[in-house]
Image (cartoon, grey):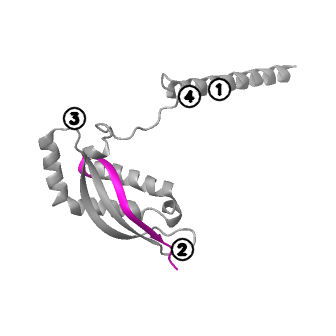
Amino acid sequence: MDKSKMMMVVIIALLILLLGTVVGVGVYLINLSDSNGGVNEPQAPAVHGVPVPADLRLVELGQMTANLALGPGGRSDNVVVNVTIGLNASDSIDEDELEEFYNFISTRGIIIARDVALRTLLSRTYDQVRSVEGQMEAQEAMMYALQDAFGSNLIVQVFFSEWNAVRGR
């Protein structure tokens, strides 16, 4: 009898521990939700508002050729791309700030911008960039990388006016 009472106490203690764990995980997951009931996700850097094409000031980075990351086949694939950056030139932007940033990125900053663009492409494989969705993801990643490199949210678009992904041998 004494042994069965001890076993019953152990089983009850384990059930209480299990119940406490379930309640704790539930409370934790509820706290992860925002007021709309969705899960909190990392937010992209704040943009002053996406301007219409007429409100963009364009900076041409020129044509670049980049070796893509090695894919599963171990091939040496590459991409030829012509990159253009769109700066927010809408009425809500301070004209002096825009002019100063445009002059910097068009002259000395173009080297940094081309480096960031190339590094963004070098980290992708042929399979990641061969589709339209992959190209759009590369444009978005490049825009965020440029915003981060220059510490400015004036960069609101990246355009590829030429795109040619070539499968290696």
Q: Which mark is residue 92?
A: 3
Name the residue located 33 percent from the left edge and 40 percent from the top edge. 50
Quickly name the residue at label 1: 22
Which element is circle 4 on? helix
Judging depth in this view, the residue of 80 and 52 nearest the camera is: 52
In x, y percent, where is residue 149?
Answer: 27, 52
Name the residue located 48 percent from the left edge and 75 percent from the top edge. 76
**What distance separates the C-alpha of mark 3 from that of mark 1?**
50 Å
**CB under 8 Å between callouts 2 and 3?**
no
Question: Is residue 156 a member of the stretch shown in magenta?
Answer: yes
**CB under 8 Å between callouts 1 and 4?**
no
Name the residue located 49 percent from the left edge and 65 percent from the top edge. 125
Identity, as a three-letter code, of the amino acid under mark 2: Gly
Q: Nearer the viewer, mark 2 or mark 4?
A: 2
Q: Nearer the viewer, mark 3 or mark 1?
A: 3
Q: Earlier in the sequence, mark 2 or mark 4?
A: 4
Relative placement, left or right, of 45 versus 110 is right
Quickly name the residue at label 4: 29
Residue furthest to the right in view is 1
Up the image or down, 52 lies above or below 9; here it is below
**What distance separates the C-alpha of mark 4 from that of mark 3?**
39 Å
In x, y percent, where is residue 39?
Answer: 52, 31
**What distance separates the C-alpha of mark 1 from that of mark 2?**
46 Å
Q: Nearer the viewer, mark 4 or mark 3?
A: 3
Quickly name the residue at label 2: 74
Which element is circle 2 on? loop
Disc 4 crowd, CA 10 A, few/some/many (<14, 14-19, 20+): few
**What distance separates the C-alpha of mark 2 from that of mark 3?**
48 Å
Identity, as a three-letter code, of the amino acid under mark 4: Leu
